[in-house]
Amino acid sequence: MKILDRNFFQKSADILARDLLGKILIHKIDNKLVGGIIVETEAYLQDDPASHSFKGQTNRNKAMFLEGGFSYVYKIYGFHFCFNVVSGEKNVGEAVLIRSLEPLYNIDIMKMNRKTENIYHLTNGPSKLCQALNININHNSICLYNSNVLFILENKSTDEITITKRIGISKGIDLPLRFYLRNNKFVSKK
DNA sequence: CTAATGATGAACT
DNA sequence: GTTCATCATTAGG
C-alpha cells in the first residue's frame, strides 16, 4: 500500500477533511503497525473562531502554521491528546482534527492501550484514538509523508459522506465542518 | 504572578 | 444527563 504524498495535503482543511475519510492512519509501535480507517474528521480554518489558530500563531499552535502534511498534536483538559493533520499553505493556520477511526491493524495492541475489550470503544473519539495508537505530544510537528513511524495510507472508500456541525466547541458551532462516513459504527456520537 | 478555560472521556445518577 | 478528573496555555495585572 502507498503512503499519501506531500501533494495530497496541499489543500484547504475543509476539502482535506473530506478527502481523509476512508484513508488509513498508522502508527508504528515496537515495529508493529497499529492503526485504522479514518471515519470522522473536523476542519479548523484560520478564519474560524473555534480554531486554535484564530488569534494568530503561538508556541502551542505553531504546527498549524506549517505547510500541509505535518501533524499537530495538543493536550486538552489536562490529560487528553488530540491528533490533527495540518493542511494548506505555510503560514496559514489550519488543520483537520481526526475524531475517530475504525480499528484495523493490531487491534490487540489497541485493546491493551485502552484497557478495554470492546472494539467500539477503542478509537471512537479524538482522545481515544490517540490512546489506542499511543500518540502523544512527542508526535507534534511530524512530517506525515516523510515518516516511517506516523503516516497515512492511500485507501479507497465508496461510503457516503455526511456533513454536520462540529462537536465540543463553544464558538463557530453552526459551521458545517464535521465529516463522517455514513452508517459507520465507529463514528463518535453525541 | 494569577486565574480562567478548554476541539474530552469515564463514571456516575 | 451530569460531574469530575486535572494541567498547559493564554490573557490580564
Image: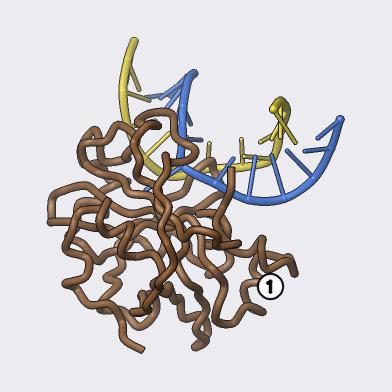
Chain colours: A brown, B blue, C yellow
- Residue, disc 1: A112
Query: Which is nearer the eye, A181 or A106?
Result: A181
- As drawn, the residue found furthest toward the left would be A90
Q: Is residue B5 above or below residue A91?
A: above
Query: Which is nearer the eye, A57 or A103?
Result: A103
Please indicate whether residue A114 sits to the left or right of residue A125 in the image: right
Q: Quick one: SS at disc 1?
A: helix
Q: Residue A88, image x and y in percent?
A: 17, 56
Q: Is residue A181 above or below residue A190?
A: below
The three-letter code of the residue at mark 1 reads Met
Q: Residue A107, image x and y in percent?
A: 62, 78
Q: Looking at the rendering, in which quadrant would you find the C terminus of chain A?
A: top right
Q: Is residue A172 above or below residue A113?
A: above
Q: How many marks can you see?
A: 1
Q: Is residue A26 above or below residue A16?
A: below
Residue at 39% across, 79% down? A149
Query: Which is nearer the eye, A50 or C4?
Result: A50
Q: Residue A176, image x and y in percent?
A: 35, 41
Q: Residue A73, image x and y in percent?
A: 39, 56
**Subunit under mark 1:** A
Q: Residues within 10 Å of mark 1 (few under 14, many from 20)?
A: few
Residue at 33% across, 49% down? A43
